[in-house]
Amino acid sequence: MKTLVLAALVAVSTTFAAPTFAEDHDAEFEAELDYLEELMSYFDLSEQFVELASKPEAAVFFAVEGIVEIHEENETLPEAIAILEGALTELPGDRAARNIIRFQLRDLYAETGNTQAAIEQLQAVLTENGSQ
C-alpha cells in the first residue's frame, strides 16, 4: 500500500513538474523533490510506529508515555500517578506492563519529591520479577 501511494505521488509530481522543468524552475522542482522525500520518510516512520505499536509491551509504553506527557504539560502529575497506580491494579498478571508502569511511577514520584515512593516502585519491580 505504501509503495502504491508513493508511486502515485511521484507520478503526479512528475506529471506536473516535467512540462515546466527549465533552469528558472530548478528551485521549485528541487523543493517538490525535497517534499516528496520528506513525505516518504514520514510514511516509513509511520509504518515503523504502527509495527512497533502492535506489540503489547510497546503499546503499553506509548500509552504510559502519553499519559505522563499530557499531565506534565498540564502540570497535573498527581493525576498521572493515580492513573498509573490504577493501571497496576488492572494488570495483575502482565509483568512487562507492570514493569513499564512502575519505572514511570518511579520517575514521577522522584520528580514530585516523593523519593520513598520512588524507591518502593523499584523494590516492587525487584520483588515482582523474583529478585528479592
Image (spheres, helix red, strand yellow):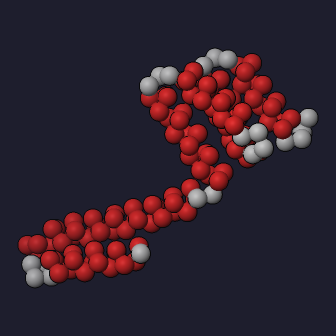
**Residue 107 showing in the rendered view:** no
At 33% from the left and 68% from the top, the residue drawn is 37
* Quadrant of the rendered image containing residue 88: top right
In front of the other: 92 or 129: 92
Q: How many labels does the image show?
A: 0
Name the spot of residue 23 as percent of width and height, x first.
10, 76
In the picture shown, does residue 62 fall above or below 72?
below
**Residue 76 showing in the rendered view:** yes
* Quadrant of the rendered image containing residue 101: top right
At 10% from the left and 82% from the top, the residue drawn is 19
* Quadrant of the rendered image containing residue 92: top right
Name the spot of residue 104 as percent of width and height, x first.
64, 34
At 50% from the left and 22% from the top, the residue drawn is 76
In the picture shown, does residue 12 fall above or below 28?
below
Q: Along the horizontal axis of the image, is 102 left or right of 75? A: right
Name the spot of residue 18 as percent of width and height, x first.
15, 82
**Which quadrant is home to the C terminus?**
top right
In front of the other: 66 or 21: 66
Name the spot of residue 27 as percent of width and height, x first.
16, 68
In front of the other: 92 or 130: 92
**Which quadrant is home to the N terminus?**
bottom left
At 72% from the left and 40% from the top, the residue drawn is 91
Residue ranking furthest to the right:
132
